[in-house]
Image (cartoon, rainbow, N blue to C red):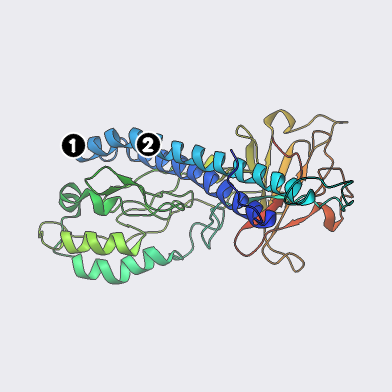
Amino acid sequence: MVIYAKGSNPEALERSSRLLLDYSRECERARGEASNAIRALEGHWGGGDFQALRGRWPAADAQLGLLGTHLGELSRRLSTNAQQQRGASAHGVNGPGGAPIPTPTPTPTPTVGHTEPRPQQHWWDKAGDMLGDAGAWTYNHSVVPTVNGLADVGQAMVEHPEDVLSMALGAGAIVLGAGGEVGGVALDATGVGAVAGVPINVASAGLIATGALAMTAGAGDLASNASKNDNHVLNEAKGPSEGKPQPGDRVPDEQRPSTSGGSWEGRVAKNGKGEVWQNPENVNAPPGTPKNANSVRIMEGTDRYPDGYVRYCDENGNPLKIDGKPGPDKSPETHFPIRPDGTYDIPAGWNP
């Protein structure tokens, strides 16, 4: 099916294709985060409200998956149409009128990946710091004084589950049915945020936060509803107590970037300033075999790369250039800068 008009700009079609592909990947990431959040709530929040939420989620999950599939298909079609448009333009409006004029081969536009959203404090930053999370700070300094001595937060949660589920996912809130419950529980790997009144162990980091709803909007709604009750005292949020993981420690699967393999394992980089995702078959490689085989490295900012950079290594441990061919280890050609919006280029043929 041809969906371009005569005179369409192939570059614009390709840009739109890349954007839709990013949206498709974001749908998949959002599905994973929401599913993980619902699993984290199991055993800590029961009753009919949670059962209703869990009952609605499979249908919403399927719809979000279908949306991601459609976006990916549209991205593919736009890319194909861009190539067809280039071919049509090269032959003129009415087809060939003689030998075509030679044109230089266009440089392939690289596909684009994106870093997963990270809080200002990385998940491996010292967990004992004084409530660096802005949401928790706002909660402690506005909601707690209002609610303290008045609110029964547990009762408010039962009566108003939509307040508990108001933390937005990176892709945007997912509305579950007509009831208005929002599946944006967003229990990220920092563990700094948790549902008020329900201490939740976030399995990926083992961190606990009690009495805190680390999103201002949700906390405001919860405070408004809870203040109508007068049989519970709300406590301030307390920071987690786990120590700082060391280089080589596992990175939670929830942080897996879209450019790594689905079964790849993440670990803190040796210098503690980034993360490495690698095929588990190549982790702890025996002597004489490449240590960096089948890996992608996402590093924090440096003087040369203020927003960080990404490196890809093939099955032989060779760092790759944008054309997908091996390049020098220290060369800028094998270091892909992360842009301020979190996007970065992907080498040609990269498909772990």
Q: Nearer the viewer, residue 86 or 14?
A: 86
Q: Which residue is mark 2?
A: 39
Residue 279 at x, y percent in the picture = 69, 33
Residue visible at 69% across and 56% down in the picture: 11
Q: CA distance from mark 1 to mark 2?
A: 16 Å
Q: Element under label 2?
A: helix
Residue visible at 50% across and 56% down in the picture: 127
State which tag comes first along the sequence, 1 or 2. Answer: 2
- Judge from the rendering whether residue 233 lies leftward or rightward of residue 172; answer left or right: left
Q: Element under label 1?
A: helix
Question: Residue 2: which quarter of the image?
Answer: top right
Residue 225 at x, y percent in the picture = 16, 60
Task: Evaluate whether residue 9 shows in this view.
Answer: yes
Instruction: Tell me if residue 51 comes above or below residue 19 in the rendering.
Output: above
Instruction: Tell me if residue 48 comes above or below residue 102 in the rendering.
Output: above
Q: Nearer the viewer, residue 170 or 316?
A: 170
Q: Which residue is mark 1?
A: 48
| Disc 2 residue type (three-letter) | Arg
- Judge from the rendering whether residue 344 lies leftward or rightward of residue 202; answer left or right: right
Quadrant of the snapshot with the C terminus: top right
Instruction: Tell me if residue 203 comes above or below residue 101 in the rendering.
Output: above
Residue 288 at x, y percent in the picture = 88, 31
Q: Nearer the viewer, residue 165 or 125?
A: 165
